[in-house]
Image (tube, grey):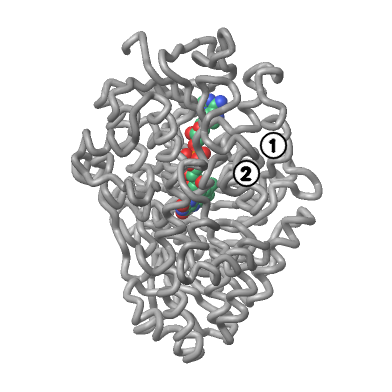
Amino acid sequence: MPDRFDIVVAGAGHNSLVTAAYLSKAGYRCLVLEGRSILGGNVVTEELTLPGFRHDSCGTAHVILQDSPMMRNDELGLAADYGLEYIQPEIVCHAPFLDGSYLTQYHDIERTVEQFAKFSKKDADAYRRMYNEYDAIKPLFDAASYTPIGFGKPINDRLNEHPDGKKWLRRQARSAWEIIRDNFEDDHSRCFMLWMAFQTVTPPEWPMTGRNAYSLAWGRQRWSWCIPKGGSGVLTEILVRLIEKHGGTALTNKMVERLIVENGRCIGVECKDGSSYRADKAVLSTVHVKHLIDMAPHKLWAQDFVDGVETYQGGPTLFVSHYATKVPMTFKGDGGSTTPIACAMLSEPTRALRMGYDFARGAANVEEPVLLAVSPTIGDPTQAPPGHHTIKIIGMQPYDLKEGPLHWDTIKNDVAKANLNWLRKFSPNLTDDNILATVVESPLDLERRNPHNWHGSCHGGAQNAAQAAALRPAPGWAQHRMPIPGLYQTGSTTHPGGSISGGPGRNAAAVMLKDFGTSLDDVVKRTTGAKPAAALAK
Ligand SMILES: Cc1cc2nc3c(=O)[nH]c(=O)nc-3n(C[C@H](O)[C@H](O)[C@H](O)COP(=O)(O)OP(=O)(O)OC[C@H]3O[C@@H](n4cnc5c(N)ncnc54)[C@H](O)[C@@H]3O)c2cc1C
């Protein structure tokens, strides 16, 4: 291993790896230090249950990522040079209902529209209209997401300049619930749309969730339940290969505990095992801001940063059970039965509203729980032994139970059982003898797995109006440059937030490269010849 590095990276989530990949391409040597025994953060594929069963431990769907300039223009050559491939199943998502009916989303929009038409012609038209409306405005939202704060216009300015933008100013400020209620008349359609709108774990009745009424269904319609061939973790494995190919190194079991600050500048980090590493140019962190702030004396942080981090909230979180099975999830569907990659369970529209209430009062959701069940082996059978499957059931639960977060250790198996039994109501073949092994992770376990899942949040913190764009992670400090010179922050505590988007990673790279006297566009042009997303970044 070389003894000098330009950049020391604390934490190896997909975002910090994306930043390091752009910096590596620009010629900077990166040392990545990951606290866990595996690189990739929430984008990893592991044999969690049994040998041969490769589970996506956290994120599976790489839908949002597909619209990033990194993927659209293959700026890092992940597809061309490293063979990253995506699978887009024709059956995207299947929603079974208690009355025996169902709504299947197909990748072919006409087939999806027909599914809505079974319930209401008006709703079928609304689905197509909303898809087209969002399709027309989406480039503006993408431009705002994939531009660092202060490097281009904020979304409201962009909308104000667009002929239809005024409508969207109102739409984004409303709640997803209001928009879905007003556009769809049938409860089946409303259930499907509300469930979709909930997929970034932000309750649909919250203000400023209006865009979610469009964007989540649009993303899955456009890209399907898009997964990387080989498993979610293939993305981060490839990013590490790229960094190493450019002279970088990635080390595991290196929990960063302290920032080294000399003459007011962050010049390296110290790890729990006593090792320390120095950076010639800069330190990049994806350590959660709630932890980062304790890694240097408080007087070194600006007071408004301290205030912003103190008031930063965790928000709703997930509860996950992984299963190794002998059978696929099988539901009543077109042609008699269907085996989808994803299943959406929401019993009736107002059930979605109770989720936010249950988060607030710290109650576990076990009655008719709102669930997502995903089985990546339907799209990519190589992830399990022949004929076998991996299934992941995800519920949404509060980290802060009224009895305290530790209570999760007492109730988690009961909650997992309730979720499985609810899925069995629609897929009765998932009997005990067809399940070979189970691993359950409560919100508390998700935090234990990855300290960046602070208070269990899979998005680095609540994605609400108080923590969006220029307010993430703290008002005045959204530009990836931290109050201590030489220290940069990426990951889901920064704009545009959580999910597998690569946005925080690419934005941090743009800021760092500018500070180093070049630009991301120049690096992309120089290293790949690809047309950079310059128009997007203005
Ligand atoms: C169960 C689950 C399912 C999900 N499903 C999806 C999905 O299908 N699609 C989607 O788009 N999103 C999904 N998400 C959300 C998404 O996976 C995350 O928002 C995203 O991956 C976060 O990426 P990141 O780069 O910000 O950081 P992370 O992936 O959180 O990585 C941060 C890394 O930093 C390391 N670290 C933290 N502190 C230290 C330290 N002090 N020293 C050294 N290392 C440290 C951590 O160990 C971790 O490896 C899901 C999340 C969960 C939990």
> Residue drawn 45% across and 60% down?
374
The label on residue 500 is none
**Is the distance from the Cβ of mark 1 to the nearest ligand 1 atom less than 8 Å?**
no
Count of numbered circles in the view: 2
Q: What's the amino acid at mark 2?
A: Leu
> Residue drawn 48% across and 55% down?
392
Residue nearest the viewer, comparing 207 with 450: 207
> Residue drawn 39% across and 62% down?
225
Q: How far across and how far down the image is residue 24, in percent?
A: 31, 27
Can residue 58 be seen by looking at this rendering?
no
The label on residue 471 is 2
In the rendered image, the vertical position of residue 244 relative to residue 343, given as above or below: above
Q: CA distance from mark 1 to mark 2?
A: 8 Å
**Label 2 neighbourhood size at 10 Å, few (<14), some (14-19), many (20+)?**
some
> Residue drawn 27% across and 21% down?
247
Mark 1 near mark 2, Cβ–Cβ under 8 Å? yes
The label on residue 308 is 1
